[in-house]
Structure formats: C-alpha cells, structure tokens
Amino acid sequence: MKTTILFYLSLLVFFTLGCKEKIRNEDQFILFQASPGKGNIKLYWKNNRHEILRSIGQLKKEVESQHEKLQFAMNGGMFEPDNSPKGLYIENFKILKSIDTLQGSGNFYLPPNGIFYLTQNNQAGIVETKKYTQSPEIKYATQSGPMLLMDGKINPAFQKDSKNLNIRNGVGILSNGDLIFAMSKKEVSFYKLAQLFKEAGCKNALYLDGYVSRAYLPEKNWIQSDGNFGVMIGITEVK
C-alpha cells in the first residue's frame, strides 16, 4: 500500500513539473511543431516579380496571391546588407547563393556553422556545414550559425551564465523527423535557446538569427508582420 501511494505521488510530481515546464516555455517562447511530410514548408526570399520580400507582411501577401493561407512564418537565416542570404541558399532545387566555408567574426562564423534543408521527399535535416553534402534531392536549404545542438549535446561554446542576451530564433529536428521552430519573446542566451530544443527532444538544432527576429503564429495570437530580412520560412495551407 505504501509503495502504491509513493508511486502515485511520484506521478503527480512528474506531471506537475511537466506542466509547469510547458507553461514556462510557452511564456518565454513562440513554439511551432511541423511535420515536413504533412505541412507545406518552404523557404522564401523574393516574390514572383523577383523583388525581395523582406517582411512577414509581404510574405503573407505573396502566399495569399497564390491562394494559400500563411499558418506560420519566421526569419530563416542571416543576410547581407542588401538582404541577400548569408551563405548557402537553395530554393526550388536552385542554388541561389553558394555555401560559405570561410572563417570570420560574428555569430554566423561561431563554430560549428550549420545548414537546415528540406528534400524532394519531404524530409528535413540539420547538419554541420563541414558534414553537408550537396544533392539534387535538396529542394530548400539555408545556412546559418552557430549550431545549437549536435547529437543531443549543447554547443560547448555556450556558457550557462552568459550575459550575451538577445531575442533569438532557431529550428530543431526531432528523432521522428518533425521540426520545432522557436523564437524567444524576451532576450535569452544561446545556452537558454539550445536548452529549449534539448528539452523538447531535438537531436540537432540551428540558430537562425538574433535581435531582428520576428514570428507569425495567429493561432497563438502572435502576429508580427514587420521585419527586414533575407530568407524567411513559411508554412502554408491551401485556402
């Protein structure tokens, strides 16, 4: 009897802590989970007139002109002063920007750098740049850095008590292939963002950008339509 009571008390503590953790994450982050095999996930840069979209608002207008509804969107990687992608960018199987394997300063070059990609068969991947292999099967790809998680481990360059805080967003991949997109509502460290993806069960995760980050998730009453980006990630459905 005593053992049974202890068992149920343990379950109660587990579920209570789990709920608190979930609520805490919802308070601090915008979270969206998507399955590449079910959702219509694309990377966007320019519209049909070859004009850079720049903002989530313009992305929304673009997808609606194609009779689609924007479910979720966020900026999808770093960019140059002219809003061109920083590093590798593939859209509809076309390499529009070459891979960047150089060394430099800034977050993009904080090792290891990484690439988020989607294949023709609706499979997603997040891989270190040095381990990336170009394939004709890759339909979309964006390069950014640093990697947040590698094989379930937080990037050793991050410090748990770091004072380097910013609004940050990234993407992680679960063992079943589903994607987790996350953006902090408040300023957080790299470690905090990486920890979020680790606790969600991701094995690999990639940082996308910092203080400029924006997200669009109307089902959670989070609508940011501004921005001045290069690449954006959009998930749509047919109207």
Image (cartoon, rainbow, N blue to C red):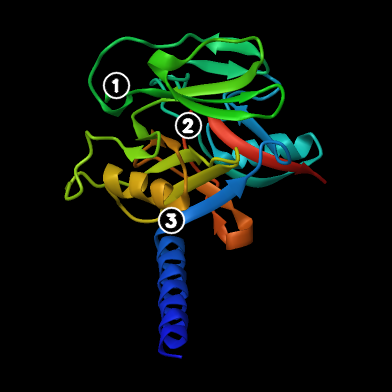
Q: Earlier in the sequence, mark 2 or mark 1?
A: 1
Q: Closest to the observer: 199 or 222? A: 199
What is the C-alpha distance between the residues marked 3 and 1? 25 Å
Q: Which element carries disc 2, helix, strand or loop? A: loop
Please determine whether, in this image, residue 45 is positioned above or below residue 165: above
Task: Identify which amino acid the numbered label 1 is placed on.
Answer: Tyr
Q: Secondary structure at mark 3?
A: strand
Residue in the picture at 24% in, 15% down: 104
Q: Which mark's residue is nearer the viewer, 2 or 1? A: 1
Q: Residue at point 47% right, 85% down?
A: 4
Mark 1 highlights which residue? Answer: 109
Residue 9 shows in this picture: yes
Q: Residues within 10 Å of mark 3 (few under 14, many from 20)?
A: many
- Read off the residue under disc 2: 229
Point 27% across, 25% down: residue: 110
- Residue 6 higher or lower than 92, as above or below: below
In the image, residue 219 above or below residue 10: above
Judge left or right: residue 225 versus residue 169: right
